[in-house]
Image (cartoon, rainbow, N blue to C red):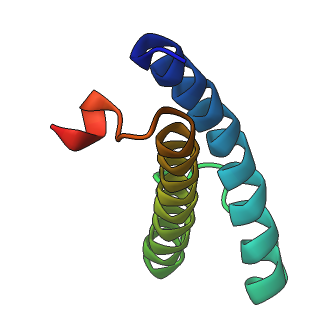
Amino acid sequence: MSDKIWSLATTGAAIGGGILAKKVTEATWKFVTGSNSPSNPEDPEVNWSEAVAFALVSGAVVQLIRVMINHKSTEAYTKRKGHLPESVAG
């Protein structure tokens, strides 16, 4: 697996991770608040505290999924190639 293929695979995984993050964020928000997540937290009709809370929850979920995907893909690359990809090592 070349670094370019690894980079493309990681990009594909990141796109899938973004979709997953959105679903997890919506489910988490519904579980915690009992209501649907705000469709547009920047809308002035959305309560300020709700917009900030949504930003914190969604940011944490996105970052967690991103780290998990990158960690696992780097682990798989290293196992296969015996070294870190250039983009991680350098």
Q: Residue at x 75, y 87 (%)?
A: 32
Q: Is 44 or 12 nearer to us in this picture?
A: 12
Taking the image as shown, residue 64 lies to the left or right of residue 13, namely left
Q: Is residue 36 visible?
A: no
Where does residue 75 sit, x and y in percent of width and height? 52, 51
Q: Residue furthest left?
A: 90
Q: Is residue 81 visible?
A: yes
Relative height, residue 60 to residue 69 (above, below): below
Q: Residue furthest front?
A: 82
Is the N terminus in the top left, top right, bottom left or bottom right quadrant?
A: top right
Q: Is 72 or 1 nearer to us in this picture?
A: 1
Taking the image as shown, residue 66 lies to the left or right of residue 87, namely right
Where does residue 15 sit, x and y in percent of width and height? 62, 31
Taking the image as shown, residue 26 lies to the left or right of residue 66, namely right
Residue 50, quarter of picture: bottom right
Q: Is 84 or 66 nearer to us in this picture?
A: 84
Q: Residue at x 83, y 82 (%)?
A: 31
Where does residue 36 sit, x and y in percent of width and height? 80, 66
Q: How many marks?
A: 0
Residue 84, quarter of picture: top left
Q: Residue at x 56, y 59 (%)?
A: 68
Q: Residue at x 58, y 58 (%)?
A: 65
Where does residue 29 sit, x and y in percent of width and height? 72, 74
Q: Is 84 or 34 nearer to us in this picture?
A: 84
Relative height, residue 83 to residue 40 (above, below): above
Is the C terminus in the top left, top right, bottom left or bottom right quadrant?
A: top left
